[in-house]
Image (spheres, rainbow, N blue to C red):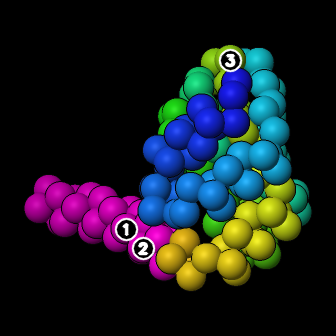
Amino acid sequence: MLLREEVELLRNIPYFNRVDPCKLKLLAFASYRISYEPGDAIFMQGDFPEATFVLLSGNVRLTASSPCGRCETTHAEPNSMLGEMCLLSDQPRAMTATALTNVEALKIGRDCLLRLVSDNPRMSFEISRVLAETLRDRIGGVGKRFSQEAVL
């Protein structure tokens, strides 16, 4: 894949869609393509995050283990980012990511992403915005479920 194509793919990710194209070119150049087959673990819950992944194709299952057992939390599809929250918060992985289908991803190293964020205040804002929207949507979904259960 050409560098230009990878920059365009990165532009489809909400975190990156307003980042300077020159910085995206550097990010695309510093990242590398990686493939997974169905059943392959992309990362494991509890691992220290060394990279984040931009999902180019395929589907990924995200699961978390707790004292109550293993629960499937969500699926990730193309044009989504995996593992960025743990990377940015410097915390162990909260979930395990497993390829459901053949997966192609861009692997972006921790230092590379953090350097881009520190050099680009707009990206810091975009990350905060996307994370806030994600939390709002998840809390909203939980609130709807609880209110529906209260009616029943």
Q: Amino acid at mark 3?
A: Asn
Marks 3/2 in contact by CB < 8 Å: the verdict is no
Q: Nearer the viewer, residue 1 or 48?
A: 1
Q: Amino acid at mark 1?
A: Glu
Q: Taking the image as drawn, is residue 135 in sight?
A: no
Vertically, is 41 above or below 111?
above
Q: Nearer the viewer, residue 150 or 110?
A: 110
Name the quadrant containing residue 63.
Answer: top right
Secondary structure beneath dot 1 equals helix
Marks 2/1 in contact by CB < 8 Å: the verdict is yes
Secondary structure beneath dot 3 equals loop
Whole-angstrom CA distance, mark 1 to mark 3, is 29 Å
Residue in the image at 67% along x and 50% along y: 25
Residue carrying label 2: 129
Whole-angstrom CA distance, mark 3 to mark 2, is 31 Å
Residue carrying label 1: 133
Q: Which residues are magenta?
A: 125-152
- Which numbered disc flags the more N-terminal residue, 3 or 2? 3
The C terminus, quarter of image: bottom left
The N terminus, quarter of image: top right
Quick one: label 1, few (<14), some, or many (20+) residues within 10 Å?
few
Indicate left or right for 61 with 137 as reference. Answer: right
Disc number for residue 102 = 3
Secondary structure mostly taken by the magenta-highlighted segment of the chain: helix
